[in-house]
Image (tube, rainbow, N blue to C red):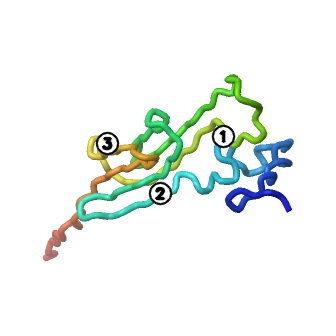
């Protein structure tokens, strides 16, 4: 029986470190097999706004960028690790933290960027978007034919 931590085998990634073609393995180099659990998003609807909460644990505020272009709200997060830095307290046996980037996009429609507010606190990015006003259908202007 192999040791496990939180339901994971401690050595389950050992042979995956020797992948000859890492692009084919389907693994995200930033968070490995846990990448599908990253950037989990909740969207709430209030009376006047949509509230978007995105989990981004471990990122600093300056590593996160939010852009609005052509009706798409794009959230990007990039992290870098300094691999040249030596650890004077010992040698790494297992290292799971990597450098990399991730992004996610949402279609939000015709919203001006000055109407969107965002704040990052406690590993959660909170974005508030206004709802679009209800568009009225064009009135019928029937012309009688004589």
Classify residue 75 as left or right of residue 79.
Answer: left
What is the CA distance from the residue labelled 1 to the residue labelled 3? 34 Å
Where residue 137 sits, quadrant-wise, is: bottom left
Quadrant where the C terminus sits is: bottom left
Q: Nearer the viewer, residue 95 or 16?
A: 95
The answer to which of marks 2 and 1 sits earlier in the sequence is 2
Q: Are marks 2 and 1 in contact (CB under 8 Å)?
A: no
Residue assigned mark 3: 113
Closer to the observer: label 2 or label 1?
1
Between 143 and 7, the one lying in front of the other is 7
- Residue at (78%, 50%) from the top-left corner? 25
Quarter of the image that includes the N terminus: bottom right
Give the spatial CA distance, label 2 vs label 1: 22 Å
Q: Quadrant of residue 112?
A: top left
Q: Which residue is mark 2?
A: 41
Compute the Cα span from label 2 to label 3. Answer: 20 Å
Residue at the spot of label 1: 97
Secondary structure beneath label 2: strand
- Eye-nearest disc, 1 or 3: 1
Q: Report crowding for label 3: few under 14, some 14 to 19, many 20 or more residues within 10 A (C-alpha).
A: few
Q: Is residue 137 left or right of residue 118?
A: left
Residue 128, position as x, y percentages in the image: 32, 52
Q: Quadrant of residue 22 in the image? A: top right
- Residue 126 % position (x, y): 38, 50
Q: Are discs 2 and 3 less than 8 Å apart at CB? A: no
Q: Residue at x 35, y 44 (%)?
A: 119
- In this image, 111 relative to 144: left or right? right
Tell me where residue 49 appears, x and y as whole percent: 28, 58
Work out whether mark 2 precedes mark 3 in sequence or the reverse, and give the earlier one.
Answer: 2
């Amino acid at each position: 029986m192999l040791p496990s931590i939180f339901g994971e085998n401690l050595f389950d990634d050992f042979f995956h470190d020797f992948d000859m073609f890492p692009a084919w393995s389907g693994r995200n180099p930033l968070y490995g097999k846990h990448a599908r659990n990253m950037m989990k998003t909740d969207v709430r609807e209030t009376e006047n706004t949509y509230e978007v909460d995105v989990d981004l644990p471990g990122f600093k505020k300056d590593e996160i960028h939010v852009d609005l272009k052509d009706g798409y709200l794009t959230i990007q997060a990039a992290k870098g690790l300094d691999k040249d830095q030596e650890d004077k307290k010992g040698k790494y046996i297992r290292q799971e933290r990597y450098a990399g980037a991730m992004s996610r996009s949402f279609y939000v429609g015709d919203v001006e960027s000055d109407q969107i507010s965002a704040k990052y606190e406690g590993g959660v990015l909170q974005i508030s978007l206004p709802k679009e006003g209800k568009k009225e259908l064009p009135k019928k202007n029937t012309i009688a034919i004589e």
